[in-house]
Image (tube, helix red, strand yellow):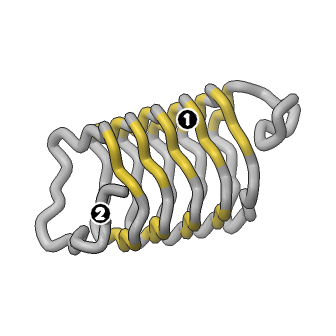
Amino acid sequence: MPDPWHPAGASDVRGEDLYAECLDAVRLDGVTSTDVDFTETTSQGAVFDGCTFHGCRFNSSVHVASSFVACDFRRTNFFDARLDGRKLYGSTFRECVLRPITVLGGQWRGVTLRGAHLTGLDLDRDRPA
């Protein structure tokens, strides 16, 4: 299978195990990830544009200065994930586990969190730019 994490790679990734992979400076446009394990992955300066993440696991992952633009997250787990100075524009989270999650700075614009259970989360440091 072509490497989906490079521009010439596949646009549909299913059931892959990317445990603890480094996704620094990767750029993905329109990639659909289904049942992919991103547990303990790290990204710095990565851009995910128009990507779909269904049934994925971002548990204990760390994303620094990375962008998720117009992404669709459904039934995706972010247990103990850290989002540090990242950009989430126009992304949608449906039926996702977002607790506990650490959010440090960054920008959330046009983000849909319908039905998300956010009780007890400290998002105070997440201010619009």
Most extreme residue toward the front, as rendered? 129
Residue depicted at x 55% and y 69%: 62
Residue depicted at x 67% and y 58%: 45
Residue depicted at x 50% and y 46%: 56
Instruction: State the residue position of label 2.
Output: 127
Left or right, residue 20 beside residue 71: right
Left or right, residue 9 beside residue 123: right
Q: Amino acid at mark 2?
A: Arg
Give the class, few, some or many, for how many residues have Cα within 10 Å of label 1's Cα (few <14, many ≥20): some
Q: Amino acid at mark 1?
A: Thr
Compared with residue 56, is residue 39 higher up or lower down, i.e. above or below?
Answer: below
| Residue 30 picture quarter | top right
Which quadrant of the figure contains the N terminus?
Answer: top right
Left or right, residue 105 beside residue 50: left
Q: Secondary structure at mark 1?
A: strand
Q: CA distance from mark 2 to mark 1?
A: 31 Å
Instruction: State the residue position of label 1.
Output: 34
Return the x and y of residue 114 as percentages of the image width and height.
18, 39
| Residue 100 picture quarter | bottom left
* In front of the other: 127 or 8: 127
Compared with residue 46, is residue 127 higher up or lower down, i.e. above or below?
Answer: below
Return the x and y of residue 16 as percentages of the image width and height.
68, 45
Q: Secondary structure at mark 2?
A: loop
Nearer mark to the viewer, of 2 and 1: 2
Residue depicted at x 45% and y 41%: 55
* In front of the other: 128 or 88: 128
Which quadrant of the figure contains the C terminus?
Answer: bottom left
Give the class, few, some or many, for how many residues have Cα within 10 Å of label 2's Cα (few <14, many ≥20): few
Return the x and y of residue 33 as percentages of the image width and height.
59, 36
How many numbered marks appear? 2
Return the x and y of residue 117 as percentages of the image width and height.
16, 56
First in sequence: mark 2 or mark 1? 1
